[in-house]
Image (spheres, helix red, strand yellow):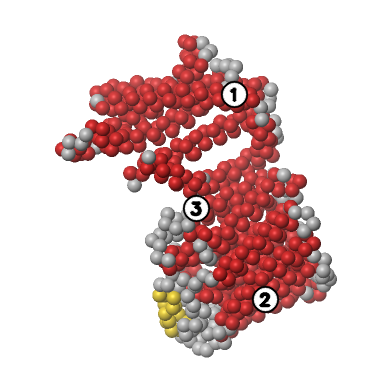
Amino acid sequence: MNAFINIIKDFPRYLWSGWGAIASLFLFLALWDLGNQFNGSLVLPSPQETFIALWQMLHTVEIWTDVAITVERSLWGFVISVVLGGGLGVLAGSFATASIMSRPIITVMMGVPPIAWIILALLWFGVSDGSIIFTLVVASFPIVFVGALQGTRTLEGDLNDMSNSFKTPLLMRLTDVYFPHVFSYIFPASISALGMSWKVVVMSELLASTPTGIGASLAVARSHFDSPVAMALVLIMVIFLLLIEYVFLEPIKREVEQWRN
Amino acid sequence: MEPTNSKLVSTKKLTNEAVEWAYPQGKYPILLAYGFRPFFLLTPIYLTISILLWGLFWSGLLPLSFLENPLEWHLYEMLFGVTSAMMIGFILTAIPELYEGEKPIVGNTLLGLISLWVLGRVSFWFMDWLGVYMVAITNIPLIIWVVFLVAKPILQDPLKRQLSLAILFLVISAMQIWFFVAKIGWLASEPMAILKASVGVFMVLVLLAARRINMEAVNHWLEQNKIDDSYMARPPRYNVAILSVALYTIIEFLYPNNSALSWLAFAVMAAVLNTLNDFFLDEDPVFIRPFIWPLFTMLVMMSLGYGLIGWDYLVPEVYAINHFRHLLTLGSLGMAYFMVLVIVSHLHTGRDFIPSNWIGFGALLILVATILRGIAIPFVGNIASWGYMLSSILWVLPFIGFLIIYGKWLQQPRADGLPG
C-alpha cells in the first residue's frame, strides 16, 4: 500500500521528467519532416500528414475495435509468457541441474526468429487467435524465463542463512527476502517481453492475414498505397507501447527497485 | 592608468560564504567603482525611454520620423543596446567573484566602456545621418573589448567553467558584425533576419545565465530558510535546451518557414520545460517562493514562446510569430534583466538579499505586460490600439521602480563599507 501511495505521490514529478524525452522525440520529428521534404509524401508522409491521418482514424469505430483486438491478443501472449516464464524460471533457478539443462533449450527458442514461429504456428493451428498467441508466447516467454532464472540463481546465501537462524516465518521470507530480489530481475525482463509481444503481435496479424487487428489494417493500408495511414498505424503502436512502458511500468519499476540504492 | 597594486578584502557572496577578492588600490568615483554600477544605472533609463517611445510609435501617437527603419532600430537596440549592456554589467561583476584574486574593472577602463556604450546608442539613433560605417565603428568594439578584459581568468581556469559564456559573447559580437556587414551590403543576408537569429543567441545567453543565477538564488533561499535540500542546475538538461535553440535558430535563418521549424520549436519548448525539473525538490516547493518564482517564470515564458511559435508554423492561419517572439524578449529576457538588476544591486552594494513584495510585484508586472503583448494582442480583437501602449507602460514600470529604489544605492558607497 505504501509503495502504491509513493508511486502516486511521485507520479506528477515523474511525468514532468518526461519533457527531456519529449524534446528528443520532437527533434526526431524534425528529422522525419526533413526526410519527407527530401523524399516526398508517397515514400515518407510528413509528421503533420500522419497526425492528421491519425486524428481522422481515431474518429472511426473500426480503429478502436482493431486496437482492442490487438491489445487483447498481445496481453494474452504477455500474461501467459510472464506466468509461464516466471514460474518455470524460478523453478529452474532453484535447482542447479534444472538450470543447466534448460539453458540450451531456451537459447534454441530464442534463436528461432518470430517470423519462423508464425509460419510453423499457421501450419500447426491454421489462421486463428491461437496461432498468434502461440507465436507471442514462444517469442516472449524465454526472456522472462531467463530473468527469473537469473534472479533465483543470484539469491544471496548469506541472507538465507540469516533468515534461517532467526527462524523467519516462510511468508515473511518470501515477501521480504526472495520476492524483492527475484522481482527486480523478472520485472525488467517482463518489460522487454511486453515490447517483444507488442511487436510480434502486429507482425503475426499481418502474416496470418487475419481480418482484424492493427496488423490487418496495416495490410489494407499497404495494398492501398496509403502511406499516411500506414505511418499513423505505426504511430498508434509506438504511442501505446510508450504509454504502457513509461506511464505504468516505469514508475512501478522505480518504486520496486528503490532498495538497490 | 590603473594602479597595479591590489589589496585583498573580504566580502560576502550570495551564499553568505566569505570570499576574498582583490580590489585595485586607489580612489574611484562611486559610479566607476564596480562594473555593474554605471551599466545598471544607465540601462534601465535607456530601456524605459526606448520602450515608451516604441509604444507611442506603434500606437500611432508619435512618428519616429528620424529613423528610416524603426523596426530594425527597435530590435537592434533592445538586443545589442540593452541586453549587451546588461550582460556586460553582469560579467564584469561576476568575474572577480568567480575567480579569486581577479581585480574588478574600475575607473578609467570602466569609464571607457560605458562611454563607448553611450556613443554606440547615440550613433545608432542617428544612423541615417551618420552613416552605417560610423555606427559600426562605435558599436562593434565594445563586446570584443569586454571579452578581452575577462578572457585571462576564464582561459587560465583549468576547468574552463565560464568558457561557454565567453564563447557566447564572441558569437553575439559576430552576430553584431554580421548585421553591420549585411547593412553595408557586403553580404546578401537580410539584416532583419540576422536580428531575429540574434534573438536565439540571446536565448542561449538567458539559459547560460539562468543556470548560474538559479543555483545561487535557490540555494541561498534554502540556506536562509534552513531547509535541508539543495538545488542543482543539471548541465545535460540545459545542454539539450541550448542545442534545440541553436538548431531552431539556424534552420529559421537558413530556411525560413520550413515545416520542420514547428517540431524544432516544440523541441525547445519541451527541453526548456525539462530544465524546470531541477526546481522540484523533495523538501520544499521552491518554485513558488518569493524571488524564485520569477526565475522559474523566466524559463516558463521562454518555453511558452517557443511552443506558440511551433504552433504558428503548424497552423499558418495563426500568423502571429512576431507577437509570440515577445514572450522570449519581453518575457524571458525582460525577467532576466529585472532579476539580475535586483539581485546584483543588493549583493554588490553590500546588502543582504531579502525578498520584498516589491520585487514580486515588479516581476508580476513584467509577466502581465508580456501576456498582454505576446498573447492577448494577437488573439483578442480591437485591443491593439491601446494594448501596445499599455504593455509598454506595464513593462517599464518595474525598471522605473528599480531606478527609484536602487538608483541611489548604485550611486552610494557599499553599505558594509567595503570598496567597490
Identify whether B179 is placed above or below A134: below
SS category of the residue bearing label 2: helix
Q: Which residue does the numbered mark 2 point to in the structure image? A: B45
- Residue at x 54% of width, y 47% of height: A19
Quarter location, residue A56:
top right
Q: Earlier in the sequence, mark 2 or mark 3?
A: 2
Q: Determine which of the numbered discs, if any, sits on residue B277 in the image.
A: 3
Q: Chain of mark 1?
A: A
Which chain's residue wears label 2?
B
Residues B8 and B186: in front is B8
* Residue type, label 3: Asn
Q: Residues within 10 Å of mark 2 (few under 14, many from 20)?
A: some
Q: Between marks 2 and 3, how big is the CA–CA gap? A: 36 Å
Judged from the image, the secondary structure of the residue bearing numbered disc 3 is helix
Kind of residue indicated by mark 2: Ile
Q: Which residue is mark 1?
A: A65
| Chain of the residue displaying label 3 | B
In the picture, measured across the screen, residue B218 lies left or right of residue A221, that is left
